[in-house]
Amino acid sequence: MIGRASFLKDMGISSLLIDLQAHGETLGSEITFGIRESVDAANGVSFLKEVKECGKIVAIGQSLGGASALLGNGPIHVDALILESVYPTIEEAVQNRLEMRLGKMGKIIAPFLYLQIPLRIDVSLSELKPIEAIKKVNVPVFIISGSNDEHTKAEETERLFHAANESKQLWLVKGAAHEDLLSYRPEEYKAKISSFIKQSL
């Protein structure tokens, strides 16, 4: 996310970059698909509001970071939200990843994996549905993903977009996979993100 922070700085926007639990240097025993990580996202917003006294906040959440902005007690309380490559449901996220490795067999095996999730992290599958959580977002939202992303497929991103409320934009980045979209299309990314932020804030 350093590249995004640098680009935003050029726009006159300060950034707070955080590790989610069990990532980077932050403690945590396991990745929980955005549910426990949502506490970190909410704490980041609280820090900006209460300590830094920020007037306007836009959040950029990439993949798990985007899910963290939506799930748990979320969505987080920001003035605009940019979601990149966010899975719609945990069932699809698991199935996609297995199909990438095992082909059609992955679809058959997927339930054996995702049905274990409630037992492992004490969270129901219904709590791991960003596509339902996004319906509660009442600020402008920009949904982005790669057209060739096999982790979060283009049609899944389109469904996430359609589930969002009216103030929304969609960009399917042609040819991109589940990767850093800023690095993939730097100038177009910067132009679209800066336009969205200016319109929204």
Image (cartoon, grey):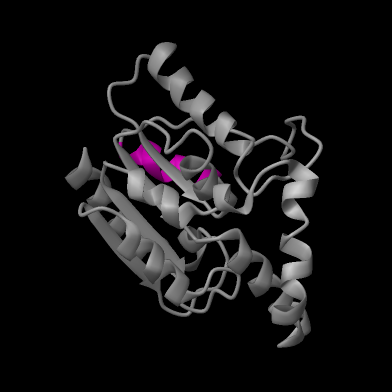
The one nearer the camera, 22 or 129, is: 129
Residue 101 pos. (x, y %):
76, 79
Asked if residue 3 is among those painted magenta in the image, a careful observer would answer yes
Residue 110 pos. (x, y %):
73, 72
Residue 167 pos. (x, y %):
21, 52
Residue 31 pos. (x, y %):
72, 45
Residue 156 in view (yes/no): yes
Residue 190 in view (yes/no): no
For residue 111, side relative to residue 35 (left or right): right
For residue 91, side relative to residue 4 (left or right): right
Q: Is residue 111 above or below residue 198?
A: below
Residue at (53% x, 37% y) in the render: 72
The one nearer the camera, 25 or 81, is: 81
The stretch in magenta equals 1-11
- Splitting the image into 4 quarters, where does residue 53 fall? top left
All told, the count of numbered labels is 0
Residue at (69% x, 45% y) in the render: 32
For residue 106, side relative to residue 189 (left or right): right
Q: Residue furthest top?
A: 51
Tell me the quadrant of the picture where the C terminus can be found: top left
Q: Is residue 166 above or below residue 15?
A: below
Residue at (50% x, 49% y) in the render: 66
For residue 35, side relative to residue 70 (left or right): right
